[in-house]
Image (cartoon, helix red, strand yellow):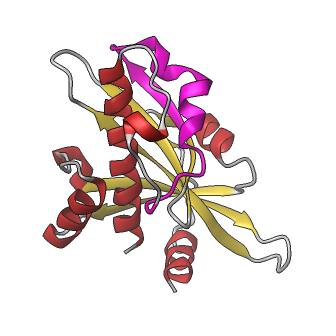
């Protein structure tokens, strides 16, 4: 039912997304090459949504998270030929630093699992931009373990690695809140 609702929302907007908040059409296409269109949707989180995200992720929802800006990837179903949502792309920040932030683009499948994570801004640690670190997120979903010391190989400055993990798991739960 959620998938049908998301598809209805996506198809109700006829203007393709051109990028926002640092997400270019090229990045969107890189993350969902099968998508024929990206539809920009927003959602203001309710107090209940915020509570659910914080409980699920173990992290505080940041002020900028409360107004989600999501690009829904829409592709043609190979079996039916009908357009359908296949996932979404959005941004989250890791702001646990005295100077600078780490800005991430997260692509999620409709089940909430991570498809891909990209670092778009980073004034902390170049190690977190490595494919070997970022690929560890692929396929992880909301019910998986996200323990930085057990489930990930940290890279460079461990504080930066932990901040990225924390931001991505918060992003997964934000996406679930977006889905409703």
Q: Is residue 119 magenta?
A: yes
Residue at image location 61% in from the left, 25% down from the top: 131
Position of residue 104 measured from the top left corner of the image (x, y, whole percent): 42, 34
From the viewer's side, name the closer residue of 98 and 140.
140
Residue 36 is left or right of residue 92, and the answer is right
Position of residue 81 measured from the top left corner of the image (x, y, whole percent): 82, 76
Residue at image location 56% in from the left, 20% down from the top: 130
Classify residue 87 by image quadrant: bottom right
From this viewpoint, which residue is outermost toward the front? Answer: 150
Q: Is residue 138 magenta?
A: yes
From the viewer's side, name the closer residue of 117 and 29.
117
Residue at image location 48% in from the left, 15% down from the top: 127
Residue 10 is left or right of residue 102, and the answer is right
Looking at the image, is 46 positioned above or below residue 165? below
Q: Quadrant of the C terminus?
A: bottom left
Position of residue 152 measured from the top left corner of the image (x, y, whole percent): 48, 35
Classify residue 111 by image quadrant: bottom right
Q: Which residues are magenta?
A: 117-143
Classify residue 113 by image quadrant: bottom right
Residue at image location 17% in from the left, 72% down from the top: 48
From this viewpoint, which residue is outermost toward the right? Answer: 79
């Amino acid at each position: 039912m959620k998938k049908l609702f998301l598809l209805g929302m996506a198809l109700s907007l006829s203007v393709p997304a051109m990028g926002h908040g640092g997400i270019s059409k090229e990045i969107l296409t890189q993350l969902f090459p099968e998508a024929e269109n990206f539809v920009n949707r927003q959602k203001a989180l309710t107090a209940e949504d915020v509570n659910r995200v914080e409980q699920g992720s173990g992290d505080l929802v940041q002020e900028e998270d409360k107004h989600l800006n999501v690009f829904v990837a829409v592709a043609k179903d190979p079996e039916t030929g009908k357009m359908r949502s296949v996932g979404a792309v959005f941004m989250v920040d890791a702001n646990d630093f005295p100077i600078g932030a780490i800005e991430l683009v997260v692509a999620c499948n409709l089940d909430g699992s991570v498809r891909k994570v990209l670092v778009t801004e980073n004034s902390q640690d170049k190690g977190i931009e490595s494919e070997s670190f970022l690929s560890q997120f692929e396929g992880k979903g909301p019910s998986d373990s996200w323990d930085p010391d057990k489930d990930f190989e940290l890279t460079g400055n461990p504080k930066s690695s932990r901040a990225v993990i924390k931001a991505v798991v918060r992003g997964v739960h934000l996406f679930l809140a977006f889905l409703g």
